[in-house]
Amino acid sequence: MKEQLLDALREVKDPDLNKSLVELDMIKNIQVEGSNVYFEVELTTPACPLKEKIKQECLLAIQEFDSSLNVEITMTSNVQSGRIGVDTLPNVKNVIAVASGKGGVGKSTVSTELARALVRTGAKVGLLDADIYGPSLPTMLGLDNAFPESREIKGKNYIIPVEVDNLKVLSIGMLVDERQAIVWRGPMVSSALRQFIQDVLWGKLDYLIIDLPPGTGDVQLSLLQHTKINGVVLVTTPQRVALADARKAIGMFQMEKINVPILGVVENMAWFSPTDRPDERYFLFGEHGGMHLAKEYDLPFLGHLPFTMTMRERGDGLASSLTEEQFSYIDKIAGASAQILALRNAQVKKKPSNSLPPVG
């Protein structure tokens, strides 16, 4: 009976890889008790946006084989690692950097909401604030008074990230007074960032989201030297000045010596909707600029995020819940990012980690 069920499920294909779920070994733990059938479908990411479609196709395939069967399917996931042979962050399967060319476009908002959305799917997620000069994640996550603990292992001290709602978070803003200016030269910034990568007990993570500072400077280059980035999510507003700087960021990540794949473009502050008139849209910064940018560089467009009062309050760390529509925009971006990354991981061959020549 199990072999017959597998034969029926061979007709169901992974939409991205265009191969049978059986061939990809995604059908797990088949159990048959009389007319009751149970099995699991193991996806490559819990954030798969096609999860329900795959489940329904499996149900249909079994029903076509034998309509008298009672079928129960559990959708599980096993996030694949895109960091083969990497020494730094050995327990982290995937590292996603969130970048922008210009400040003030909502990059930290996207970083935070992307991490939260992946946590909601059941993934193990960490969030690192690499914006050394202007850390904002403690405020956005209500962690202004949080201070990470440390643990000594074999004579060396390691930092333990602060955990909030199953999300592990670390920021320089947790270690210095918020009124204290961080006036550091490049080497000090690079040293701090290296410590945040190498001397932190992140534990086992499916995704580590790194909130980069804006621009194309020391922090970006230091990060690329110290660890392997699996993909970049680029954030921009529709405004022309933001798009101009976003092009510079794309140019940096596509440089031959850097060559980090860009998973796609997010258009933040795409429009403004008043709280009392949520169906009205005011395109304050222009319209579809991020979408046009993605098309210009042949990059995936991950989605829009509107500018609303609740989003602003949530960004200020206030206890404000988003609407169902706002969550749908965020979940779409997270699902698309995870799906593209999973597809890249499935296609990539074993390669050495990124290496850059010394900077400076």
Image (cartoon, rainbow, N blue to C red):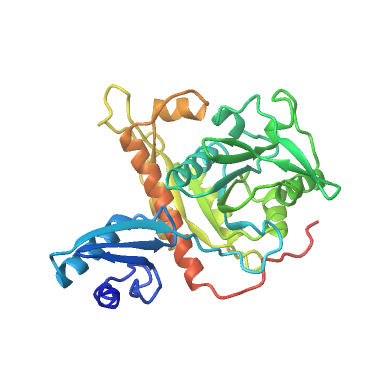
Q: Position of residue 162 (x, y in %)?
A: 63, 36
Residue placed furthest toward the right: 155
Location of residue 88 in the rendering, given as x and y in whole percent from the top left corner: 70, 58
Q: Is residue 187 visible?
A: yes
In terms of image quadrants, where is residue 324?
A: top left
What residue do we see at 21% from left, 69% from top?
61
Q: Residue farthest to the front?
A: 34
Frontmost residue, 79 versus 104 = 79
What count of labels does the image hold? 0
In front of the other: 149 or 192: 149
Using the rendered image of the protein, determine whether residue 299 is visible from the camera's viewpoint.
Answer: no
Q: Position of residue 303 (x, y in %)?
A: 38, 48
- Quadrant containing the N terminus is bottom left
Residue drawn at 70 percent across, 48 percent down = 219
On-image quarter of the C terminus:
bottom right
Res. 64 image quadrant: bottom left
Answer with left or right where residue 111 lies relative to residue 73: right
Residue ID at (86%, 47%): 155
Q: Give the x, y percent position of residue 82.
A: 56, 64
- Nearer to me, 253 or 28: 28
**Picture quadrant where residue 29 is located:** bottom left
Judged left or right of residue 170, residue 284 is left
Q: Residue furthest left?
A: 67
> Can you say whether 305 is above or below 232 in the image?
above
